[in-house]
Image: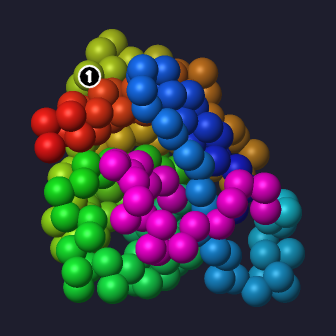
Amino acid sequence: MYGHVEKLAEEIKKGASSVEGVEAKLWQVPEILPEEVLGKMGAPPKSDVPLISPNELAEADGILFGFPTRFGMMAAQFKAFIDATGGLWRTQQLAGKPAGIFYSTGSQGGGQETTPLTAITQLVHHGMIFVPIGYTFGAGMFEMEKLKGGSPYGAGTYAGDGSRFPSELEVEQAFHQGKYFAGIAKKLKGSA
């Protein structure tokens, strides 16, 4: 809504694209909130990133899902999109595809772990292979002096009231996740 997840997504795309032979694309899910509500929330206009339809997910070799958090879970806009993937679920078109998660929360207690934990259930029902970053980001995972979002589940950021944007360390973690995930997706595709 405010660009935090999009900033992480741009860095993830750069990281994924740095892996030879990998093509990464950015998509956004449709907005479901009325313009009146968005205006009251101070939401800026949507970016020009293309909208995705559920069926387009089947074309991907791997998918990194990014979303903001509302009350410790993925935002309703993203959940509505996932709920529209029933046809893919019925035919198991996403089964065996690698998937990862990245997110934005409003505060430290706002869902940095509950958001990915509750989102994993969506991947499991589709038979997707969850690819966390674990502690592969190295020392950046143990940063204690600076505020840093993210976890072993995936890259993350703290949005606060919407005015805080991803820090340099959070952006580096997003790039790492994209590169790490793309390498695994490429290996899985090559072994198929």
Q: Hey, which residue is sitting farthest left in the picture?
A: 191
Q: Hey, which residue is sitting farthest top in the picture?
A: 139
Look at the image and tell me whether residue 151 can be seen: no
Question: Relative to residue 100, is residue 88 depicted above or below?
Answer: below
Look at the image and tell me whether residue 90 can be seen: yes
Quarter of the figure with residue 33: bottom right
**Quadrant of the image for the N terminus?**
bottom right
Which of the colour schemes (rainbow, by chain, secondary structure, one colour) is used? rainbow
Amino acid at pointer 1 = Thr
The question of residue 61 being in magenta is answered with yes
Q: Residue at x 52, y 50 (%)?
A: 104
Question: Relative to residue 145, is residue 25 depicted above or below?
Answer: below
Foreground residue, 102 or 113? 102
Q: x and y percent of residue 169 in the render?
A: 52, 22
Q: Residue at x 42, y 26 (%)?
A: 21
**The residue tagged with tag 1: helix, strand or loop?**
loop
Residue range of the region highlighted in magenta in the rendering: 46-67
Q: x and y percent of residue 129 in the render?
A: 18, 52
Residue that carries the numbered disc 1 in the rendered image: 136
Crowd around label 1: few <14 · some 14–19 · many ≥20 (10 Å): some
Question: Relative to residue 144, is residue 184 depicted above or below?
Answer: below
Foreground residue, 116 or 127? 127
Q: Residue at x 29, y 33 (%)?
A: 186
**Quadrant of the image for the C terminus?**
top left
Q: Is residue 17 left or right of residue 83?
A: right
Q: Residue at x 13, y 36 (%)?
A: 191
